[in-house]
Image (tube, coloured by chain):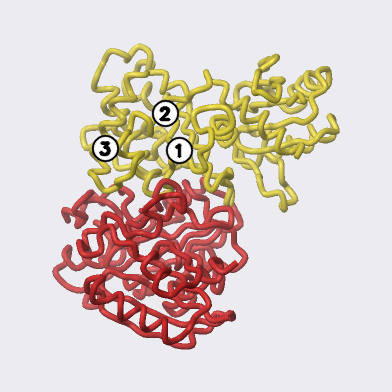
Chain colours: A yellow, B red
Amino acid sequence: MLYGALEAGGTKMVTAIVNEKGEVKERASFPTETPDKTMPVLINWFKERHPDAIGIGTFGPADLDEASPTYGYITSTPKLAWRDYNILGAFKEALGIPAGFDTDVNAAALGEAAFGCMKGISDGIYITIGTGVGVGVLTNGKLLHGMLHPEAGHILLSQNAKDTFAGNCPYHKNCFEGLAAGPAIEKRYGRSAKELRDIPEVWELEAEYIAKALVNYIMILSPKKIVLGGGVMHQEQLFPLIRKKTAELLNGYINTNETANLDDYIVPASLNDNQGILGCARLAELALK
Amino acid sequence: MLYGALEAGGTKMVTAIVNEKGEVKERASFPTETPDKTMPVLINWFKERHPDAIGIGTFGPADLDEASPTYGYITSTPKLAWRDYNILGAFKEALGIPAGFDTDVNAAALGEAAFGCMKGISDGIYITIGTGVGVGVLTNGKLLHGMLHPEAGHILLSQNAKDTFAGNCPYHKNCFEGLAAGPAIEKRYGRSAKELRDIPEVWELEAEYIAKALVNYIMILSPKKIVLGGGVMHQEQLFPLIRKKTAELLNGYINTNETANLDDYIVPASLNDNQGILGCARLAELALK
């Protein structure tokens, strides 16, 4: 079997062909323009490669409810050309093969569960911290959709008293994304995250916000594994700071094997930034079954 | 079929016999003393009534992992007499009938799902705000356990700038429970919640903290229904305040049928404070199957 995988992002579309072992046989990347321009390119790419099924992990919000008349649509995105666009339907019609559909971050969580560091784990989360913050959630062995899908990058956090930054989210300034995504770091200090690498205070504060979010994820979802990926998390000095701060904030309230060993509980993404594409391949496989 | 139901609380044990229709045929309440004193009383009560199965919803933390050697135990509770006590095992051995086991709040969520206002809903939460704050979580049609079980009363919240109360949680002062449970209200104002009923500022602040918590539950769990019960929620004037504040904080970010109609989304518990006992009966039924 060959699975087609599409990570549909707001700035680029990553396509891949993946085999059953989770090996990426081929991949490509295309800029995200309008559906009129971009979709024929993507459809042709997949048509030429004859996958048996396709899996799509998309930017959102998206309608994941199979019983809904707009299942498979990208919905109220600020990217207007893609608003209310039936991306799943377009691929199904053009390719005539089974197609799976979920959010980009749920796909990434699934990728880690199928091939990476969440293998065999029924309840876990994948968090990406980059230009935005997104969270994919696995509970009882399934991706969590619920009413819509998690938007856990937008949880409200208490701001550090010394941090006078106004917050960067247009909806809720002091949410996790508004305080801690890449653009928030850049705006707070007037420099890119990479240029700030050697300034400890930057990463102390960043770790504090990430830890505050993790504590809330732990209290609400009780995950067995927490995987952190995305551009900001390439600053690997964050991991020990996050673990330390999380332990301080939990303050001994949760006593499990996992919280006793935070090095193994709060971990970096394991698949060389391929967790999204591999999760899409897994969505394709599930659609075929 | 007759189901035995036990709501095991830190101050009282509520027992009941429930039929398949969810009718409570008989109930009793006993003070929670030590296992030595309390357990024989409870066991006799059930023995005399011959239920076909029993369901236990307990105060926590509790071990819900069926694969664990301490499955069915109350674990690291501050109530020392009950610490590491195998409550499920004691009932199984004494009664010799199938027995279901979960947290008190998960049982309450299950009760609302089986017989109340979450009927037919796959993803929802039941929140109790009383002497503490607890949250039962249903995702993909199943109660959420994960690593341990949700402890979502202990999420960290941003404190209102004018609220100088130090917070009442011994672990994390400004968590939801520490700021908004009944004892926090009493300590902040030096009077009981009932005596404060006619002071609007009290309920404005209380609604703000509840709404901040709900926003985080919505962002993380994406529930299709939010049910609020417990002693504090008997202050019914809270509901419109909570809905208004939740809408303000969401600020249009989540657009679903549910968020468009908050009167039907954020609702009071529906079963006259019987959701716990009925959920325990449902646990018994599931154990029998």
Image-based side of B282 in relation to A237, left or right: right
Residue identifier under label 2: A181
Residue, disc 1: A153
Residue B64's x, y, as percent? Answer: 42, 55
Give the quarter of the figure containing the N terminus of chain B: bottom right
Residue for point 44% across, 41% down:
A154
Residue bearing the label numbered 3? A247
Pointer 1 indicates a residue of which chain? Answer: A
Bin the neighbour count of mark 3 within 10 Å (Cα to Cα): few under 14, some 14-19, many 20 and up. some
Q: Cα distance, mark 3 to mark 1?
A: 21 Å
Q: Quadrant of residue A32?
A: top right
Which callout, 3 or 1, points at the residue further toward the start of the chain? 1
Decide: is A205 above or below A254.
above
- Counting residues from the start of the chain, the first of labels 3 and 2 encountered is 2
Say what amino acid the circle numbered 1 marks: Gly
Picture coordinates of residue A166 (x, y %)?
33, 34
Count of residue discs: 3
Disc 3 + disc 2, Cβ < 8 Å:
no
Q: Are marks 2 and 1 in contact (CB under 8 Å)?
A: yes
Kindly state the secondary structure of the residue where label 1 is placed: helix
- What secondary structure is marked by label 3? helix
Pinpoint residue B135: horizontal percent, then vertical percent: 40, 59
In the rendering, which numbered label is found on residue B124? none
Q: Are marks 2 and 1 on the same chain?
A: yes
Residue B188, picture quadrant: bottom left
Using the image as rendered, state which of residue B213 and residue A252 is in the foreground. A252
* Residue density around tag 2, few if under 14, some if 14–19, many if 20 or more, within 10 Å: many
- Return the residue nearer the eye: A195 or B87: B87
Classed neighbour count for the residue bearing mark 1: other residues with Cα under 10 Å, few (<14), some (14–19), many (≥20): many
Residue type at mark 3 is Ala
